[in-house]
Image (spheres, rainbow, N blue to C red):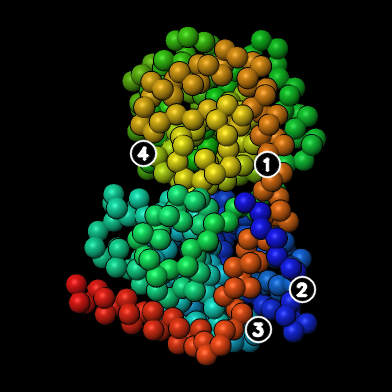
Amino acid sequence: MTGTVDAKVTGGSRRRVLMLAPHPEVAGPIPKLAEPLARALESFGWEIQTAPWGRRRENEGAVAKVFGRARDLLRIRSQIASGGHVVLFVHTATDWRSLLRDIPMLLVAQRNVRTVLLFHGSGPSWLADRGHLAFKLATYARLALSDAVLLLSSHDVDQWQRFYPRGHFHLVANAFVGVNRAQHERRVEQVAGAAPTLLFVGRLMAEKGVCDLLDAFVKVRSQVDCRLIIVGDGPLANELCRRAVHLGVSDSVVFTGYLAEPELNEVYMRADVFVLPTYSEGFPTVLLEAMSFGLPIVTTSVGGAPDYLTEGENVLYVPPRQPKALAEALDRLLHDETLREELGENNRRKVDDFAPLRVVGAYAGVLNEVVEPTACAPSPFQDRLERFKAFWFARWMR
C-alpha cells in the first residue's frame, strides 16, 4: 500500500503542483484529506499550492454555478500561468456535476501542465448500472484529457482499466490524520449499564444501504437492548424517519443530520460499533474515522475495504443488500464484548498505516512519472490532444 520514492527532486528545484479541492464550506471529507496530502508531498520535494474548485455552498443555484465555474476557470488558468506549475492535481468524483466542472478546466489547462485526477467514491460499476450514453461519453472524454488517474481500491483500478484501456490508473490510499490519544481515552469512559450504540455516518441515499440498516436494526433490537445513531443528510432523510416510525424503532433511532467536527467526534466517542452496509465505494473516509476511535466495524466487502481490512481482525463483512446477514453480524458483535475490543484495538493500530507520510510515496511516484520527460515525448498538451482526438474518432467510428 505504501510506496517509497526518492524525495530528491531532479535538477535541484522544487516542482510545483496546483491542487484543486472542494471549498471548505462544502460538506464532505475531501478538504480534510487534501491538506494532509499536500503537506506530505512537500516533504518529497514538491511545492504544493491548494485552491478551491467547484460549488461554494451546498445549495448553489444554476446561475451561480455557471458564473462561479467560469470565474474558477479564469482564476485557475491564471494561477497555473503565473505560478510555474507543472502538474494540475484534481480531487474529483464520478458524477455529472464533476464532469461538467472538470472537462472545461482540463481543456483550458496550460500546454506544459500535466493533469492528475484523484477519484473519490465508486467507479465504473456505477457507470454500468446507472450511466447513460452521454454520461459515459463525457467520462471517456475526461479520462482522455488526463495524464494519470488515482483510485482508492484495486477493484476500481481493474474496473476503470476495463472501461478505458488507454488510461493510466494507479492505486493509492487516503492520507488520513486521526484523532489524538486524549480523545481515545474519553471514548472508553462509557456509562455503566448503558445500552450499546450502533453508528452509521454517511450520505442518506439508497446506495449506502441505510434502508437495509433500519430493517436489520429491527431484528437486532429484538435480541438486545441497543440504539442506532444515523449521522448524515441526503435525499432519503425524510423517508428514513418515516420508515423508523413504521418499523416501530423510532424511539431507539436518532437522526442527527450532517455533523461537522467536533460534534461528529463526540458521536464517534459514544459509539460501540460502526456500521456501513454500502453497495459501492472507493475507500470511505468514515471507515478511517471509525478506526481512529477504536471502533469495530461491520461493512460490505466492496471497493477498497478488502484491500486494507481483514475479516475477523478489523471488520466483519456482510453481503450488500442482505439485512438478515447484517443483523446477524451486528448481533454477534453486541453479544461478544471480547471480539468488539479486539477489532477496535486492531483498528486503532491499523489506522496509523494511513498516516500521510506512510501513503504519500505512491502519490509522489505517480507525479514523478507524469512529469519525467522521455525521448521524443510530445508536450503534455499535444499528448492530451492526441488522446482526445483518438477518443472522439473511436466514438464516431462506432
Depth check: give the residue in front, 82 or 58. 82
Q: Name the amino acid type tagged 4.
A: Ala
> Local crowd at mark 4 within 10 Å, few (<14), some, or many (≥20)?
some
Q: Quadrant of the C terminus?
A: bottom left
Looking at the rendered image, the disc whose residue lies closer to the viewer, 1 or 4, is: 1
Which residue is situated farthest in the bottom direction here? Answer: 376
**What whole-number distance in Å separates the C-alpha atoms at marks 2 and 3?**
21 Å
What residue is pinned by disc 3? Answer: 83
Q: Tag on residue 8?
A: 2
Percent x, y of residue 278: 43, 38
Sequence-wise, which precedes: disc 1 or disc 2?
Answer: 2
Residue 217: image quadrant is top left
Q: Are marks 1 and 2 in contact (CB under 8 Å)?
A: no
The residue sitting at 49% across, 21% down in the picture is: 329
Sequence-wise, which precedes: disc 4 or disc 3?
Answer: 3
Residue at disc 1, secondary structure: helix
Q: Name the amino acid type tagged 3.
A: Gly
What residue is pinned by disc 4? Answer: 206
Depth check: give the residue in front, 150 or 192. 150
Left or right placement of residue 365 versus residue 127 in this view:
right
